[in-house]
Amino acid sequence: MDANGNTIRFWFGGGNTVASYAWGRIPFVSKAVLFVPESCAKAVRFAFAVADICKITNISDMNGTDTVNFWTPAVGSKYDGTPGDHTYDFPVYFTINRDLETNPLPESCGAGLQVTVKPSAAQIDRDMPIIFNGTQVWPQP
C-alpha cells in the first residue's frame, strides 16, 4: 500500500505455482475510464510491471530466466530485464476500448489513436521490491 492506502503491488508466494498451461488471475479494481468525446483515443492500454521470481537473489545476481523473468516496460528501470531476453520490454497489458457506437470519434481523428500508459522508471524502482512484514525480501539488499 502507498501512504494513501492504495494498493500499488501484489505479491503471491509460497505454495504451488500455476501450471504453464493455465491462466493465473489477479484481482484488479478500477474506477470508470471515461473517454472525452473530443478525444481521438479509441483505446487506452495500461502497461503493468510483473516479475516471476524463481530464486531470491540480490539485484546484481539476477541472471535471466534462472532467477527471474521480467514482464516490464523498458523505461530505464533497474527491473527492465536484459535486452534480447524473450521478456525484455514485454509488459503485461490491460486494454480498455472506447465504445465507438455510443461515443464515436470526431471526424478529424480518422481511425483514432491507441494511448499507452506506462509507469516511470522511478515508479517501478520504488514499487517492484517485495516488502514483507517491513523487511525487503526481494531483491535482497
Image: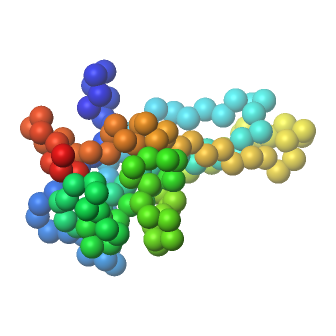
| Residue at the top extreme, as displayed | 4
**Which residue corresponds to the image point at 26% horizontal and 45% vertical from the top-left?**
129
- Relative height, residue 83 to residue 110 (above, below): below
Q: Quadrant of residue 101?
A: top right
**Which residue corresponds to the image point at 17% horizontal and 42% vertical from the top-left?**
136
How many dots with numbers? Answer: 0
User: Is 32 left or right of 98, judged from the image as shown?
Assistant: left
Q: Quadrant of residue 22?
A: bottom left
User: Is 18 left or right of 90, judged from the image as shown?
Assistant: left
| Closer to the camera in the image, 88 or 33 | 88
- Relative height, residue 82 to residue 106 (above, below): below
| Residue at the front extreme, as displayed | 60
**Which residue corresponds to the image point at 66% horizontal and 34% vertical from the top-left?**
35
Horizontal and vertical percent position of residue 44: 61, 44
| Closer to the camera in the image, 99 or 90 | 90
Horizontal and vertical percent position of residue 109: 85, 41
Horizontal and vertical percent position of residue 62: 29, 62
User: Is 66 left or right of 100, judged from the image as shown?
Assistant: left
**Which residue corresponds to the image point at 43% horizontal and 36% vertical from the top-left?**
122
Q: Is residue 47 visible?
A: no
